Image (cartoon, rainbow, N blue to C red):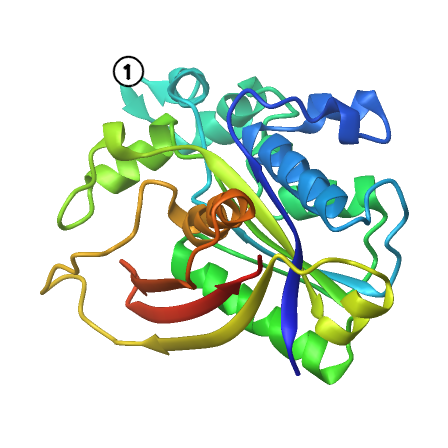
Amino acid sequence: MELVVTGAGEAARGDDPTPFLKSRKTRKFMGLQDELAVVAAGRALESAGLGGRPLGPDVGLYLAVGYIPFEAEDIDGILGNSTVDGRFSLKRFTSDGYQSANPLLTFRCLSNMPAFHISVNFDLQGPYFTTYPGPGQFYVALELAQLALESGLAEAAVVGAVAHQRNFLVEHHHARLLPPVAASSLADGAACLVLEPAERALARGARPKARLAEVKVDYRPFDPFRESRPASETSLGAAELPVALCREIAKAAATPNGPLTHRLEAHDGTVAESVWELCR
């Protein structure tokens, strides 16, 4: 079955999700990763000619979410109310520490919340899959979306990724990798693609922007305590491939060029490759 990209949308820090929200009140539950995901999904659906309409059970959602974000001031506040004589106390943490955090904080950090906000605001009720935290896992989401479309489980799929990396917790994690990744090289971003069978796209008059020609995903096990794993990941983490494809699609609209071949060696051992033929 030939699968094509009929919609592509990218989002960056500072983009306003409000135009895509059914209720402005839900904004208080949203962290940066939620805002980025909603904007990217909304732009992708508009690009596919599916904006402003309920998607229902025929459209699936396959999303990779980056490392769990957390800001230093929030961690410091919890820690400050969880110590006794300068040392961490589990007893005080369970009685005072965790209650000192903003009760809405957990909603903004959970890895499944970007999928929730996309589903609610675009009435997306089809099959779904959420994974994290890196670009290798985006390939897993892409493969599952491909299988769902080829098997008829879904008629179309929103496939995307979001990464909120410029925060204390994610920067701290990358500093501990072998080799370490500098905080200055990390970026926040999101992108979504609308993927559907070429026959369905043609039937509804949608113009394909790219064709998925090939996907390969493999895993090469290694001992992280004994060997380092230099990776080819970019600063955008989980959002690496969909952002790159969105940008190539935008360039191809103005200047026709060849296919996009994306190769990945991830920190977690995932080795993947995909080929996308850009439509003119």
Q: Position of residue 128 (x, y in %)?
A: 70, 62
User: Which quadrant: the C terminus?
Assistant: bottom right
Asked if one can make out residue 199 in the rendered structure from this viewpoint, the answer is yes
Q: Is residue 185 above or below residue 215?
A: above
Residue positioned 60% across, 19% down in the render: 102
The answer to whether 52 appears left or right of 233 in the picture is right
- From the viewer's perspective, is 80 left or right of 49? left
Tell me the element at label 1: loop
> Where residue 279 sits in the image (x, y, percent)?
57, 60
The part of the image, by quadrant, that contains residue 185 is top left
Write the residue at 25% across / 75% down: 221
Q: Quadrant of residue 110?
A: top right
The residue at 18%/62% (across/down) is 224
The number of numbered badges drawn on the structure is 1
Q: Going by the image, does 226 lie left or right of 72?
A: left
Residue named by callout 1: 85
The residue drawn where x is 64% and y is 67% is 4
Q: Is residue 30 above or below residue 140?
A: above
In this view of the protein, which residue sits in the foreground, 203 or 95?
Answer: 203
Spot occupied by residue 162 in the image (x, y as percentages of width and height): 52, 43
Q: Amino acid at mark 1?
A: Asp
**Towards the viewer: 168 or 88:** 168
Q: Quadrant of the N terminus?
A: bottom right
One can see residue 111 in this view: no
Quadrant in the picture for residue 100: top right
